[in-house]
Image: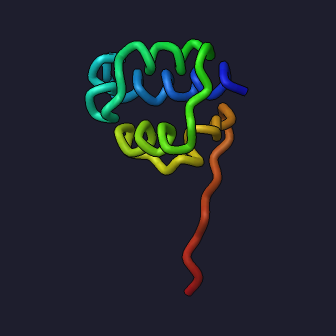
Amino acid sequence: MPVMLGQRIKQLRTERALQQRQLAEKAALTPSMVSQIESGRLTPSLHTLGKLAGALGVPIGQLFDRPQPGRVHVTRERD
């Protein structure tokens, strides 16, 4: 799971046009730590995941969810 988690973090980072250094600054981490997490060499703690999620502007759960291509989930408000 660390590699998939790292890939997801990298995907979210690149979607926001952030460099690893910029994400590290926003999350109060070192650029080396962000690099190791993205490459799957380091498994982040829950605390670190919270920092990354906050810096990326997503809930922690989104770090684990990879949207399925071509699938959209729509929810309607009840009248």
Give 60 or 46, whichever is nearer the viewer.
Answer: 46
Up-down: is 74 above or below 29? below
Q: How is the image coloured?
A: rainbow
| Quadrant of res 14 | top left
Image position, residue 52 (x, y; %): 43, 36
Q: Give residue 58's position: percent from left, percent from top.
A: 44, 46
Q: How many marks?
A: 0
Tell me the quadrant of the picture where the C terminus can be found.
bottom right
Q: Position of residue 43 (x, y in %)?
A: 61, 26
Picture quarter with the N terminus: top right
Most distant residue in the right direction: 1
- Answer with the quarter of the image where residue 27 lies: top left
Question: Taking 33 as reference, is 7 left or right?
Answer: right
Residue at 44 percent across and 20 percent down: it is 34
Q: Residue at x 68, y 35 (%)?
A: 68
Q: Nearer the viewer, residue 21 or 19?
A: 21
